[in-house]
């Protein structure tokens, strides 16, 4: 129930090389005044859907969406609250006001692609992006959809907020389908979620033979993050550690990178200071990069 | 996915008091009344809410993150639900937690902006995510399993409950704690004021004079359990989660699709999943928010699904009694449905001054009524056209 086939992939990383140009990424009307995290998500989805044409081939009522986010609306909510405190709620800009409900990012994506099966939003700290893979896999196995857009989107935390100096921004979207029928796509991802206190059980489920070539970690320096890094150091031959910015995007970005890495199976492990843990196993289709 | 999923524990904190008994007896007594949120910074036309009598004193923090009212309500209701289910020690360690949370710990961030927070972060440079409620509950119960936070706005906990039931049917878990929790937030109230959807009088679903919704705070929790597991340990069940379905309007950020096409589809698919027909349903907990369009569209949808049976199908007008509890609304709906199925009665709605002729549904106001058929449908909708429908059944659920 935890694995799915990836058949499309889109990644938006604003500020990498050049600023995000919404007019170029999303030509047409109705995009420029959307919150940035909605723009990133739609732009990443455009690439993913172009890759995985199976999404638009499915009937509209069989297309689903699962989006993870932690800080997508944080800057917007901060601005809204400042307006209420310093002026009046009547001064809130009407177009972006509904986005205090962060599920609107996923819903906007569903509207863009007529995804009528469901739009599910996940907001668990740090793990929500990769968790979205597992929720999509379960929904596919349970027949709630035939094909799912799976993603994470974040926008930089407002200045002065703890973690703002290094927070996630951008989006990743994958097209997910059930594993099987002899198709290989971009590879298979299999995510297990649990708690830091339950690391051993989760590891045994993700790596039943206790042998994995490459393990990437996205961890902070909290007690939970240090504990997981310590546990992994004793188990892994090739442990590659990455700092965890505020948000849930970086772990899914590393999964996307793993699908393009042309290597044997690898893991992406992330944990939250609040205790959440996710282990994602990536199995590329062959030794040649599919990307 | 196969297998029966039962409700074996219920916990609640609401404006009617702490505990499922306070919720049920408060509903039978006609529900609560809204009052103004005391917040000198809440500059808006209406700051009415259906507020819990008191905020639990603990837990004050999770790791470095100070916890505001929402997560504290969650922990109190979760403890009641797992106690009710008879889960202790190792059973709690192996308990996954799947909660629906829209605003979560947002009040902590709001209090920090106004300098009114009582507890500072123990690590002030570290990121303090907003949605830590599920993690706080898992920590309080000693769970070593997954804790997931579902963020589908006002339908969040109905989606979370469906995820929890799917986990059991898929064989991923035998028992899952699900539900939701929300506290009062300035941004949530302010946004609904700006959108013209905050009623300054009270929450008046299906009333012609309604002017929007009125939020409520609190938490509702349910222990879901596979029938085999419950039978093996001799657990008593309130109800069965017989079917659940999702759909998405994929149309407008705030307004429901006037055609109700996808709301109707969710209701019919939930009935199909439950193996029931429209005439088998004995009551409905509607989404019924008191906003102008929602109540009309939902009424049309119920008329389309239930036909003439609508004339005899009582609604439990929950938001008129505890307010719109946002991300918890679906869990409150399911908890209320479970309690109603056990009691075999539908609580009466508070007074409706003038029933809206556009809402051709039955909202009893003249005392409790027996549930004539042991099945209750719970509707839960949200911004973005996120629709969820859950069908609970009673009767011989322990068989």
Image (cartoon, coloured by chain):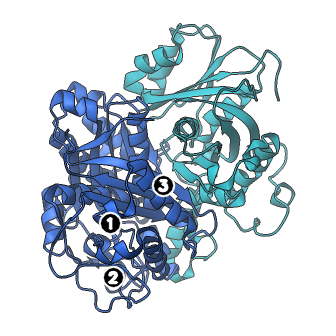
Chain colours: A cyan, B blue
Pick whichever, A233 or B74, lies toward us: B74
Residue positioned 44% across, 86% down in the render: B358
The residue under label 3 is B269
Side of B397 relative to A88 (left or right): left
- Residue density around tag 3, few if under 14, some if 14–19, many if 20 or more, within 10 Å: some
- Residue A122 x, y percent position in the rendering: 51, 46
Where residue B51 sits: x, y (%)? 26, 69
Closest to the observer, B59 or B363: B363
Q: Residue at x 28, y 86 (%)?
A: B352
For marks 2 and 1, the one nearer the N-term is 2
Q: Earlier in the sequence, mark 3 or mark 1?
A: 3
Which is in the foreground here, disc 3 or disc 1?
3
- Parent chain of label 2: B
Who is closer to the viewer here, A52 or B307? B307
Measured in 3D between alpha carbons, the distance from the residue under mark 3 to the one under mark 1, in whole angstroms, is: 17 Å
Q: Report how far apart the C-alphas of labels 2 and 1 lie in the structure.
A: 15 Å
The C terminus of chain B lies in quadrant:
top left
Q: Tell me if residue B69 can be seen.
A: no
Say which chain tag 1 marks.
B
Q: Which labelled disc corresponds to residue B285? A: 1
- Earlier in the chain: of badge 3 and badge 2, it is 2
Query: Left or right of B177: which side holds A290?
Result: right
Residue A207: which disc? none
Mark identifier at residue B204: 2
Mark 2 or 1: in front is 1
Same subunit, tags 2 and 1: yes
Q: Residues within 10 Å of mark 2 (few under 14, many from 20)?
A: many
In the image, is residue A98 above or below residue B340?
A: below
Q: CA distance from mark 3 to mark 2?
A: 29 Å
The chain to which mark 3 is attached is B
Q: Which quarter shows the N terminus of chain B?
A: top left
The residue that appears at 19% across and 34% down in the rendered structure is B87
């Amino acid at each position: 129930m935890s694995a799915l086939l990836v058949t499309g992939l889109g990644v938006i990383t604003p500020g990498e090389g050049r600023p995000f140009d919404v007019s170029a990424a999303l030509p047409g009307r109705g995009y420029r005044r959307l919150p940035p995290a909605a723009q990133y998500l739609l732009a990443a989805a455009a690439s993913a859907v172009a890759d995985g044409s199976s999404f638009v081939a499915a009937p509209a009522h069989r297309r689903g969406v699962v989006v993870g986010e932690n800080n997508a609306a944080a800057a917007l909510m901060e601005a809204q609250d400042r307006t209420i405190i310093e002026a009046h709620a009547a001064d809130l800009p009407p177009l972006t006001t509904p986005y205090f409900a962060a599920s609107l990012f996923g819903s906007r994506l569903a509207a863009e692609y007529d995804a009528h099966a469901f739009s599910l939003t996940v907001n668990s700290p740090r793990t929500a992006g990769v968790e979205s893979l597992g929720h999509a896999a379960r929904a596919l196995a349970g027949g709630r959809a035939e094909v799912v857009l799976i993603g994470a989107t974040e926008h930089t935390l407002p200045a002065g907020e703890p973690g703002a100096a290094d927070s996630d921004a951008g989006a990743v979207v994958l097209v997910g389908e059930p594993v099987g029928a002899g198709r290989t796509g971009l590879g298979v991802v299999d995510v297990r979620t649990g708690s830091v206190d339950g690391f051993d059980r989760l590891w045994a489920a993700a790596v039943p033979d206790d042998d994995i070539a490459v393990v990437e970690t996205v961890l902070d320096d909290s007690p939970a993050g240090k504990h997981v890094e310590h546990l992994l150091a004793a188990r892994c031959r090739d442990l590659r550690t990455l700092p965890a910015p505020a948000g849930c995007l970086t772990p899914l970005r590393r999964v996307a990178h793993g699908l393009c890495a042309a290597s044997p199976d690898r893991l992406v492990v992330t944990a939250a200071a609040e205790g959440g843990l996710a282990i994602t196993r990536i199995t590329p289709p062959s030794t040649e990069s599919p990307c | 996915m196969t297998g029966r999923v039962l409700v074996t524990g219920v916990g609640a904190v609401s404006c009617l008091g702490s505990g499922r008994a306070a919720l049920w007896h408060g509903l039978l007594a006609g529900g609560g009344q809204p009052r103004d949120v005391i917040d000198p910074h809440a500059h808006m036309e209406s700051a009415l809410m259906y507020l819990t009598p008191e905020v639990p004193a603990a837990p004050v923090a999770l790791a470095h993150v100070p916890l505001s009212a929402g997560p504290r309500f969650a922990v109190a209701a979760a403890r009641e639900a797992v106690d009710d289910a008879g889960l202790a020690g190792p059973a709690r360690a192996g308990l996954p937690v799947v909660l629906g949370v829209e605003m979560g710990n947002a009040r902590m961030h709001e209090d920090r902006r106004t300098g009114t927070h009582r507890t500072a972060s123990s690590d002030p440079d570290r990121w303090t995510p907003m949605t830590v409620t599920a993690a706080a509950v898992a920590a309080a119960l000693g769970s070593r399993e997954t804790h997931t936070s579902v963020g589908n706005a006002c339908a969040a906990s109905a989606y979370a409950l469906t995820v929890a039931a799917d986990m059991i049917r898929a064989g991923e878990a035998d028992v899952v704690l699900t539900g939701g929790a929300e506290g009062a937030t300035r941004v949530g109230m302010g946004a609904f004021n700006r959108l013209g959807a905050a009623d300054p009088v009270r929450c008046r679903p299906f009333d012609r004079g309604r002017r929007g919704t009125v939020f409520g705070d609190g938490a509702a929790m349910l222990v879901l359990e596979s029938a085999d597991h419950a039978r093996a340990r001799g657990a008593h069940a309130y109800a069965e989660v017989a079917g659940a379905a999702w759909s998405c309007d994929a149309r407008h950020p705030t307004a429901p699709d006037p055609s109700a096409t996808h709301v109707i589809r969710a209701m019919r698919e939930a009935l199909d999943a439950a193996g029931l027909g429209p005439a088998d349903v004995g009551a409905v907990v509607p989404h019924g928010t008191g906003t102008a369009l929602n109540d009309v569209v939902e009424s049309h949808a119920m008329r389309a699904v239930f036909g003439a049976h609508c004339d005899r199908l009582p609604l439990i007008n929950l938001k008129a009694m505890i307010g719109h509890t946002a991300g918890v609304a679906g869990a409150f709906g399911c908890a209320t449905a479970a309690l109603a199925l056990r009691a075999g009665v539908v609580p009466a709605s508070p007074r409706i001054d003038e029933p809206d002729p556009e809402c051709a549904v039955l909202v009893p106001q003249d005392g409790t009524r027996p549930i004539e058929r042991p099945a209750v449908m719970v509707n839960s909708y949200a911004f973005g056209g996120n629709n969820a429908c859950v069908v609970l059944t009673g009767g011989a659920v322990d068989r």
